[in-house]
Image (cartoon, rainbow, N blue to C red):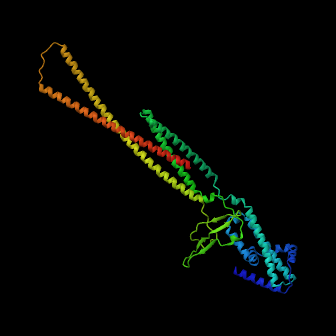
Amino acid sequence: MAEEEEGEITEKEIGEEEENNEEPITAEDLKQMVEENDVLIGDILEEKPEDQIISEADNEGGGIEDSVMEGEEREQGDTIENANEEDGVDEQEIKKEGTAEEGMEEEGAADEGMPEEGEEDAEKKETGEKEEIIEKDVIEEKLEKPPESVALKGRIDDKTMKRLEQVEKEVNEAANSIYILKGKAEELLKKEKMTENEEKELEEVNAELKRQMDLFDEKTKEIQDIIANTNILETMPVRLPQVRHEEDVLPRVLLCGEVEDYVPKLIVCHQKIKVSSGSTRECMPECPGPSPPTATTAPKKKCGNDEVQEAICVKNSDIGKMRSLLEEDISNKDKILDNLKLNLESLQNEINMVSAENTELSERLRKLQQNQIRQKTCAPREPKKMCPSLMAAKLQEYSEYARKLEKQLAEMETDFKNVHKEICAAQKERDRREQARNSVAKQFCKKK
């Protein structure tokens, strides 16, 4: 590159020496020469490579304003250059034509005469202004008519959209089924006495409710995974480049850092871009971390949907925690109910045993009474004499046994009442937990 630049400098010096020995040429003469000698432009373009032509155009024409326009085009990013390769080719062709015109001007100057230094500067300024006007027109056309490729950039795939819609439908169906099953369970629990069929139905409803809740959790997690896998910045519409004004020439990014740091830091300046309506639009992108010194583009702006997604994730996590706590409480209450049912069954078995013993004793008494009646109807016999002490002992035994039975019955009745109270309290607590769960599910459905 250095050798090429030195060669260009020597060619320029030779051309200036030749021009100093010739007469000056006006702008009208240059235009006529360019119009008449279109064939020479193609010859110049074939002789010189593209990089050399562009570098000559940048060095000779435009000055400070050309550098400003190039900085603005770089700040616009790769969107216009990548999406509009054809427009980029047009710009290169325009630059080639500009450089070709300058080459023609130099040839004409060498043929006709030598202009003075002031006139050369004026002609260069005129050609530079023409190139600037052409470049501005091209950029404005690009900004007014953005390509379809830029507008279509960053859309979600149709497969993911269909999957999201399908999962959303499944979530809504699961929520509706949960609501219906909870209504059935509440209706069954309101009954004071339930039959065996109703108990089986309640168990089936609880199992189905648990299955639907698990399905609901799986689908919500699937939605969160899909949202996390898709980049939200790509799904948002691309912000098209706007027309550049004079106040946009200020620096956008600053490089700073200490000498000891190998990699400088990029700081994005706070800027206010004026809109055509008169209002100001503040642009406050985040300050990125250390980046390589070759980076010239500003970092992507953080979209507000990231904050919304984070808030939704936090709310979903809170709802999941609440749901897990409610499920734990319900499982504990179910265990308590099962234990109470077992206690009731054991008490009922004891009551049945006591009733069976009572029936046996009553049958014995009845048999004894029948035997006594038969003995009376039979021929009188000499009554057997019984010892009064034995009779008193038997009566005392019977009375003690009867007292023990009465005490056992009273204790069983008190235990039965306590168990019944505990069951009622557990059912009330379960109803309250179900209501809380319904409210949480409704809030979650509304947020969705």
| Residue lying farthest to the front in this orientation | 278
Image spot of residue 57 (x, y percent): 76, 76
Question: Is residue 46 among what the camera can see?
Answer: no
Image spot of residue 308 (x, y percent): 57, 57
Question: In the drawing, does residue 22 fall left or right of residue 234?
Answer: right
Is residue 31 shown above or below 303?
A: below
Image spot of residue 73 (x, y percent): 70, 69
231 and 265: which is toward the camera: 265
Question: In the drawing, does residue 178 fall left or right of residue 96?
Answer: left
Question: Is residue 325 among what the camera can see?
Answer: yes
Question: In the drawing, does residue 248 fall left or right of residue 122?
Answer: left
Question: In the drawing, does residue 135 fall left or right of residue 114?
Answer: left
Is residue 321 shown above or below 413?
A: below
| Residue lying farthest to the top in this orientation | 379
Query: Which quadrant: the N terminus?
Result: bottom right
Q: How many marks?
A: 0
Is residue 141 shown above or below 365?
A: below
* Residue at image location 70% in from the left, 81% down from the top: 2
Image spot of residue 239 (x, y percent): 67, 61
